[in-house]
Amino acid sequence: MIVDVRGKNGFTVTEAIKNYAVEKLEKVQRYFTEELDAYVVCKTYTDHHRVEVTIPTKYYTMRAEVSDDDMYAAIDLSINKLEAQIRKHKSKITRSLQKKEGVSDLFVEDLDFEALKRELVRTPVKVKNISLEKMSTEEAITALEVLGHDFYIYKDEDTEKVNVLYIRNEGSYGVIETE
């Protein structure tokens, strides 16, 4: 795999970070028969680090974006996210793109999913409990901006249903309303 690791927001990529990212991305390469390119962007903020990994293939693009207090942990989490995407969507992608010649040759067929599950079990998962507050959408937007997160879960004061406020790709806000 050809890996391009870059730093943004004042982050300088050290040789140790680059080697770590390359080593971890080799786990993703084993799913594919052809050599892939991977683009890793490491960003630093005052309270966290963000890693964005993009791997374009001939037929689709894989992408993972993860934040954590530690750059190494963010790299690990982004690789786990990519692997989960691949396992979840491998058959769907292959089936929907079968019309295009060679798609089935893109993936490695003989994967030991049990070994992969055992490997992923060792990866710690962060669990956070929250208590939902009743508030308006405007108050939720303020809370989202104050926290600096990509989403915010709250109980709508009018409907008393759980809603998820999130930032859309173009920067506007979206709300997912539950039933």
Image (cartoon, helix red, strand yellow):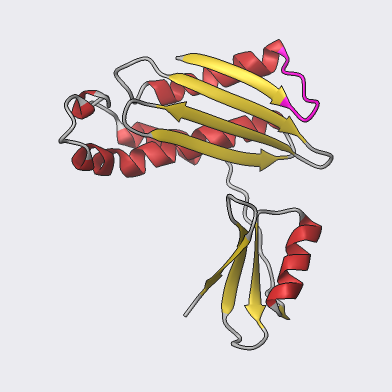
Quadrant containing the N terminus is top left
**Residue 163 placement (x, y as % from top left):** 58, 73
Q: Main secondary structure of the magenta part?
A: loop
The answer to whether residue 47 is above or below residue 3 is below
Position above or below: 93 against 156: above
Q: Which residues are magenta?
A: 8-14
**Which one is in front, 30 or 92?**
92
Residue drawn where x is 58% and y is 46% of the image:
125
Asked whether residue 178 appears in the rendered view, the answer is yes
Residue 40, image quadrant: top right
User: Relative to residue 157, is residue 65 drawn left or right?
Assistant: left
**Which residue is more in the foreground, 57 or 131?**
57
Residue 123 visible at all: no
Is residue 160 depicted above or below 140 in this figure? below
Q: Is residue 16 left or right of residue 164?
A: right
Residue 24 image point, x, y percent: 53, 22
In the rendered view, tell whether residue 135 sits above or below residue 114: below
Number of numbered discs: 0
**x, y (%) of residue 75?**
61, 30
Residue at 69%, 11% in the rendered image: 15
Q: Position of residue 6 (x, y in %)?
A: 66, 20
**Occupied quadrant, residue 95:** top left
Magenta-span inclusion, residue 12 = yes
